[in-house]
C-alpha cells in the first residue's frame, strides 16, 4: 500500500492521470501527452495572463477608496508585471517548434507556477474583503469566481495544475465569505464550494478523455508509419530514417547507402493468380528481406512491390554489396502461394551518400536509376549508381527537354473518368486525368513525367493548363456535374495558384463549387502548414477539396482535423481486397464511418466488379469510381457516356 501511495505521489506533480485511475502509460507516451497538454496551456496563456492583468487593474480601481488602497496597488502592480511577463514568455514558447516529448520536471515547473499564481489571487479575499465597501466586496467575489472558472478552463487537461491554481482561491474565498455575518454571503460561500467541486470534476473528466484521445492519436500515428499489408515501415518511416542518416552525415561524416529493390515480374503474378496471391507474395518477400538485415535496420515497403533500406554506419561499400547479395539470395527459394510454387527474383540498385547525393530525392532517384540498370542486366543483378554511363539518366534528361515544349506542341490532353452516386444512381462528375502523347514514345504515363515536372518546376505551367482546360470542358456539361483536378505538392508552393483557379473559373463562367481539387496524403507529410491556408481560401471561394488515396500508409487523423476537406477517396488497394481480406473490408467500413461522423463525403476508387459495388452500397458509401462505372474517355465522348441511362441504373449490367 505504501509503495502504491509513493508511486501516486511521484506521478501527481507531473500530471500523470494514472494516479487518479486514468489510462496507464509508459514514460515515452506520458512525455508525448505532457507535450500536448503543455502546448494547449501555452496557447491559452497569453490571453489568460492578459485577463489576470486586467482583473488586477479592476481590483485596484475598486479598492481605490479602501483603507488597503496602497497594499492593493502594490499587489496589483506585482500581479500585472508577473502576468505580462509569463504571457510574453508563453507566447515566445508557442512560436517555437512543439516538442514531441516533455519531461516531468517541465510539468513540475508548470504546476509550481500555477500554485504561485493561485496563492497570489487567494490573498485578495483574505487581505482586502473585510475593509472593502459593499461594491468592492462584490467585485472581489466576482473576480475570484471568475478566476476559479478561468483556472479550470486554462488547465482543463492538467488536473494537478488546475487544483494547484484554484485550491488557494477556492479556500480563501470560501473562508472569507463564511466569516461574514451577512447570511447572503454564507449562501454565496456555499455556491462557491459547489461550483468548485463541479469545475474540478469537469476538469478530471475532460483530462481523462483528452488523454484517451491523445493515446489513440499517437497509436494512429504509429500505425501510419507501418505498411498495413507487410507490417514493414512505410515510405514515411523510410523518409524519416533517410533524413536521420543525412543529418548524421552532416554532423559526423558517417557515410551510408540506400538500397532499392522490387519483385521481378510482380505484375505477371497479379495477372495470373490474382491480387490476393500478389499480396501474399509481398508479405512473404517482406519477411525474407527483414531476416537479411541487422536488428537496428529495417527494410521498408515504399510502394507497390518496391522495398528500400538505409544501411547506416557504412565503413566500406562492400558492406552494402554484402546486404544486397543476401537480398538476392533470399529469393532463391520459390514462394508457396495458393498451393503453387512461384519463383520470385529481384535485382538491387545502390546509391552511396555522399558520393551519389546528399539530399533525399537525389539519393532515391540515383538508387532507382541503378535499379533500372540492374533489372536490364537480368534477375539477381546488383548495380551501384554510375552517373557517367547511365542510359536511364540520359533518357530522363531527354524526356525533361521534351516536356518543356509539350504544351506549346499541343501534346498534352485530358481524359475524364466518371464519379457515380450510389444513392441517386447517376453520374455526378468526372476526374480529369492528364496524359502526354509523346511524338516518338507515344502516350506516356503521368507517373513517369509528373515527377520530372515537379523537380524542374514545369508542374506550375502544366497545372495551370490542366485547370484551364478542365474548367473550359466543364462549362459545356450540365450544371449538376463537377470536375476533379489532381494537384501535386509542388503546386502549393506557387503563389499564383489561387489567382490561376479564379481566372479559370471566371473565363469558363462556371460556379466554383463545380471544381474539385484532389490532393494526396503523401504531399501532406511536413507540408500541410503551407497547404492549409490555400485550401481554406479555396473553400471560402466555393471550390471543394478531396483527399485522394486515403489510407495508403501516410494517413494521419491529424490532417482531417487541421485541414479542410469536402471528400476523402478510399484507395483502390483496399477496395480491391475488401471481398477477400477481412482486414481490407474492416478498413473500408471504418473509413466510411469516420467520413460520415465528420460529415465528409466518401468516394471508393477502383471499383471493377458488381460485387464490390453492392458491398459499398450496403456500407453506405456515397460515390464510386472505377472501370465498372466507366473507363477514362475524351471530352467529346462525355455526352455519349451520359446518355447511357440504363448502364447507370444497374452498373456492370
Image: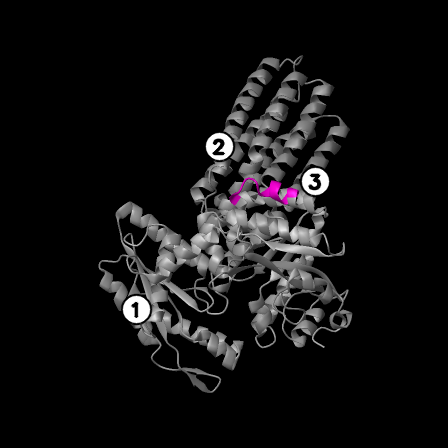
Image height of 99 relative to 394, above or below: above
Q: Which residue is mark 3?
A: 194
User: Which SS class for mark 3?
Assistant: helix
Decide if residue 6 is in sight here: no
- Residue 501 at what x, y percent from top left? 63, 45
Identify the residue at horizontal 51%, vertical 36% (top origin): 94
Marks 2/3 in contact by CB < 8 Å: the verdict is: no
Q: Earlier in the sequence, mark 1 or mark 3?
A: 3
Which residue is farthest bottom? 339
Badge 3: few (under 14), some or many (20 or more) residues near its Cα, within 10 Å? few
- Tell me, yes or no, whether the highlighted magenta stretch contains residue 494: yes
> In front: 620, or 258?
258
- Residue 481 at what x, y percent from top left? 73, 57
- Tell me, yes or no, whether the highlighted magenta stretch contains residue 393: no
Decide if residue 435 is in sight here: yes
- Residue 382 at what x, y percent from top left? 30, 68
Residue 295's disc number: none
Horizontal arrangement in the rendering, residue 205 relative to residue 448 (left or right): right
Q: Select label 1 or label 2 by which is in front.
A: 1
Q: Which residue is mark 1?
A: 382
Identify the residue at horizontal 62%, vertical 24% (top origin): 54
Q: Which image quadrant is residue 639 in? A: bottom right
Badge 1: few (under 14), some or many (20 or more) residues near its Cα, within 10 Å? many
Horizontal arrangement in the rendering, residue 108 relative to residue 365 (left or right): right
User: Which SS class for mark 2?
Assistant: helix
**What range of the chain is rendered magenta?**
493-503
Amino acid at each position: 500500500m505504501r509503495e502504491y501511495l509513493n508511486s501516486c505521489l511521484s506521478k501527481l506533480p507531473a500530471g500523470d492521470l494514472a494516479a487518479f485511475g486514468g489510462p496507464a502509460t509508459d514514460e515515452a507516451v506520458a512525455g508525448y501527452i505532457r507535450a500536448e497538454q503543455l502546448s494547449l496551456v501555452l496557447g491559452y496563456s497569453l490571453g489568460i495572463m492578459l485577463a489576470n492583468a486586467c482583473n488586477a487593474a479592476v481590483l485596484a480601481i475598486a479598492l481605490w477608496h479602501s483603507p488597503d488602497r496602497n497594499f492593493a496597488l502594490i499587489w496589483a502592480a506585482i500581479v500585472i508585471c508577473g502576468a505580462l511577463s509569463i504571457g510574453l514568455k508563453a507566447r515566445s514558447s508557442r512560436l517555437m517548434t512543439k516538442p514531441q516529448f516533455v519531461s516531468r520536471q517541465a510539468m513540475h515547473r508548470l504546476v509550481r507556477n500555477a500554485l504561485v499564481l493561485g496563492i497570489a489571487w487567494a490573498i485578495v479575499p483574505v487581505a482586502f474583503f473585510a475593509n472593502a465597501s459593499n461594491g468592492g466586496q462584490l467585485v472581489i467575489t466576482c473576480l475570484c469566481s471568475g478566476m476559479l472558472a478561468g483556472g479550470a478552463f486554462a488547465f482543463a487537461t492538467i488536473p494537478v495544475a488546475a487544483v494547484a491554481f484554484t485550491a488557494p482561491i477556492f479556500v480563501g474565498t470560501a473562508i472569507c465569505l463564511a466569516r461574514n455575518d451577512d447570511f447572503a454571503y454564507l449562501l454565496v460561500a456555499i455556491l462557491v464550494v459547489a461550483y468548485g467541486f463541479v469545475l474540478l470534476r469537469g476538469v478530471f473528466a475532460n483530462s481523462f478523455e483528452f488523454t484517451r484521445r491523445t493515446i489513440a492519436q499517437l497509436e494512429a500515428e504509429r500505425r501510419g508509419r507501418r505498411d498495413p499489408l507487410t507490417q514493414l515501415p512505410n515510405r514515411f518511416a523510410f523518409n524519416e530514417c533517410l533524413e536521420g542518416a543525412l543529418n548524421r552525415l552532416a554532423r559526423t561524416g558517417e557515410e551510408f547507402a540506400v538500397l532499392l529493390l522490387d519483385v521481378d515480374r510482380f505484375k505477371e503474378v497479379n495477372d495470373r493468380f490474382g491480387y490476393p496471391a500478389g499480396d501474399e507474395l509481398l508479405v512473404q518477400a517482406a519477411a525474407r528481406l527483414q531476416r537479411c538485415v541487422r536488428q537496428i535496420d529495417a527494410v521498408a515497403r515504399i510502394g507497390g512491390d518496391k522495398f528500400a533500406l538505409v544501411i547506416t554506419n557504412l565503413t566500406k561499400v562492400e558492406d552494402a554489396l554484402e546486404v544486397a547479395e543476401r537480398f538476392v539470395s533470399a529469393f532463391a527459394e520459390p514462394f508457396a502461394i495458393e498451393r503453387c510454387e512461384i519463383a520470385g527474383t529481384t535485382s538491387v540498385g545502390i546509391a552511396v551518400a555522399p558520393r551519389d547525393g546528399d539530399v533525399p530525392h537525389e539519393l532515391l532517384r540515383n538508387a532507382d536509376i541503378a535499379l533500372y540498370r540492374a533489372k536490364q542486366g537480368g534477375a539477381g543483378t546488383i548495380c551501384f549508381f554510375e552517373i557517367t554511363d547511365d542510359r536511364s539518366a540520359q533518357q530522363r534528361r531527354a524526356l525533361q527537354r521534351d516536356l518543356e515544349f509539350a504544351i506549346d506542341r499541343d501534346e498534352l490532353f485530358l481524359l475524364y473518368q466518371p464519379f457515380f452516386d450510389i444513392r441517386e444512381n447517376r453520374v455526378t462528375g468526372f476526374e480529369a486525368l492528364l496524359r502526354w502523347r509523346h511524338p516518338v514514345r507515344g502516350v506516356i504515363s503521368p507517373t513517369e513525367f509528373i515527377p520530372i515536372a515537379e523537380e524542374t518546376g514545369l508542374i506550375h505551367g502544366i497545372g495551370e493548363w490542366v485547370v484551364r482546360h478542365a474548367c473550359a470542358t466543364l462549362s459545356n456539361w450540365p450544371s449538376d456535374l463537377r470536375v476533379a483536378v489532381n494537384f501535386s505538392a509542388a503546386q502549393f508552393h506557387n503563389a499564383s495558384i489561387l489567382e490561376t483557379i479564379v481566372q479559370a473559373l471566371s473565363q469558363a463562367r462556371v460556379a466554383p463549387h463545380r471544381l474539385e481539387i484532389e490532393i494526396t496524403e503523401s504531399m501532406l507529410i511536413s507540408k500541410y502548414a503551407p497547404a492549409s491556408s490555400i485550401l481554406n481560401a479555396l473553400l471560402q471561394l466555393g471550390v471543394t477539396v478531396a483527399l485522394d488515396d486515403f489510407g495508403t500508409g501516410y494517413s494521419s487523423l491529424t490532417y482531417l482535423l487541421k485541414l479542410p476537406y469536402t471528400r476523402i477517396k478510399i484507395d483502390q488497394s483496399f477496395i480491391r481486397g475488401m471481398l477477400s481480406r477481412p482486414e481490407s473490408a474492416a478498413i473500408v467500413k471504418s473509413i466510411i464511418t469516420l467520413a460520415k461522423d465528420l460529415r465528409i463525403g466518401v468516394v471508393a476508387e477502383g471499383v471493377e466488379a458488381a460485387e464490390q459495388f453492392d458491398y459499398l452500397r450496403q456500407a453506405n458509401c456515397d460515390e464510386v469510381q472505377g472501370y465498372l462505372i466507366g473507363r477514362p474517355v475524351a471530352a467529346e465522348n462525355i455526352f455519349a457516356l451520359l446518355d447511357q441511362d440504363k448502364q447507370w441504373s444497374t452498373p456492370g449490367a
